């Protein structure tokens, strides 16, 4: 059977409601592998992942941002994507690629996910990054890009279709 990457991309949608069912160790390992195998600038491997499957800690992560964290309310697993700013000046881009790879792998193995932005966001009392650093004991040199809430889907969203492709956003040769 031939793998269809475009079909996978069209199927992946942001899921914010998850079933009350833990992920297996094998599933978590597959997600982690996808993130760690993502390309990084100069192959410097500045991206690191923190897997959180303790529900109390996931709910505390939810409070590290003042809005937009509903996906953490029911997620059985959260992956915090961080980057070493001393190793790479493009850790944000590298971490974004890793997070995207994790989300695509989640979809491929039948799980749902949602990206919850933390970089340049705030909580009620501090920056979201600082709140997460304190909660998870992350050294200051690491930037916190996002939290991926992951689990078994408890909502259905239609896949994108070819009709959703907005060709007006593509420019050839120069901007028109």
Image: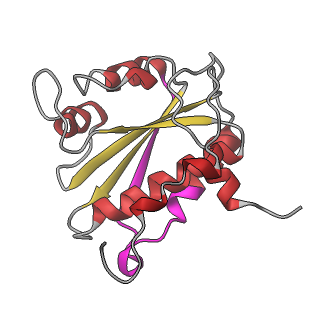
The quadrant of the picture occupied by the C terminus is bottom left
- Residue 167, compared with residue 45, is above or below; it is above
Is residue 116 in sight in this rendering?
yes
Instruction: Locate residue 64: give its quadrant.
Output: top left
> Residue 45 location in percent, x, y?
40, 69
- Residue 168, compared with residue 123, is above or below; it is below
Going 51% across and 35% down the picture, which residue do you hit? Answer: 14
The quadrant of the picture occupied by the N terminus is bottom right
Going 66% across and 20% down the picture, which residue do you hit? Answer: 21
Is residue 105 in sight in this rendering?
no
First to last magenta residue range = 34-54
> Residue 144 location in percent, x, y?
27, 47
- Reply yes or no: does residue 40 show up in magenta: yes
Q: Which of 110 and 32 is in front in this view?
A: 110
Q: Which of 96 and 140 is in front in this view?
A: 96
Going 29% across and 63% down the picture, which residue do you hit? Answer: 91
> Residue 11 location in percent, x, y?
65, 44
Instruction: Locate residue 96: give its quadrant.
Output: bottom left
Q: Is residue 129 left or right of residue 38?
A: left
Q: In this view, does 88 lie to the left or right of 42?
A: left
Instruction: Locate residue 59: give its quadrant.
Output: top left
Q: Nearer the viewer, residue 75 or 164?
A: 164
- Reply yes or no: does residue 169 show up in magenta: no
> Residue 69 location in percent, x, y?
35, 25
């Amino acid at each position: 059977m031939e793998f269809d990457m475009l079909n996978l991309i069209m199927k992946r949608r942001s899921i914010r409601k998850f079933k009350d069912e833990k992920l297996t160790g094998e599933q978590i390992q597959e997600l982690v592998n996808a993130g760690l195998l993502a390309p990084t600038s100069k192959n410097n491997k500045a991206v690191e992942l923190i897997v959180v499957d303790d529900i109390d800690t996931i709910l505390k992560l939810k409070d590290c941002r003042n809005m937009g964290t509903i996906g953490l309310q029911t997620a059985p697993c959260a992956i915090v994507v961080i980057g070493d700013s001393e190793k790479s000046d493009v850790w944000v881009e590298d971490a974004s690629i890793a997070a995207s790879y994790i989300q695509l792998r989640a979809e491929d193995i039948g799980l749902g996910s949602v990206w919850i932005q933390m970089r340049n966001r705030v909580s009620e009392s501090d920056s979201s990054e600082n709140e997460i650093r304190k909660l998870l004991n992350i050294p200051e040199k690491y930037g916190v890009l996002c939290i991926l809430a992951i689990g078994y889907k408890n909502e259905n969203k239609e896949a994108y279709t070819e009709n959703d492709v907005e060709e007006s956003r593509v420019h050839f040769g120069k901007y028109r």
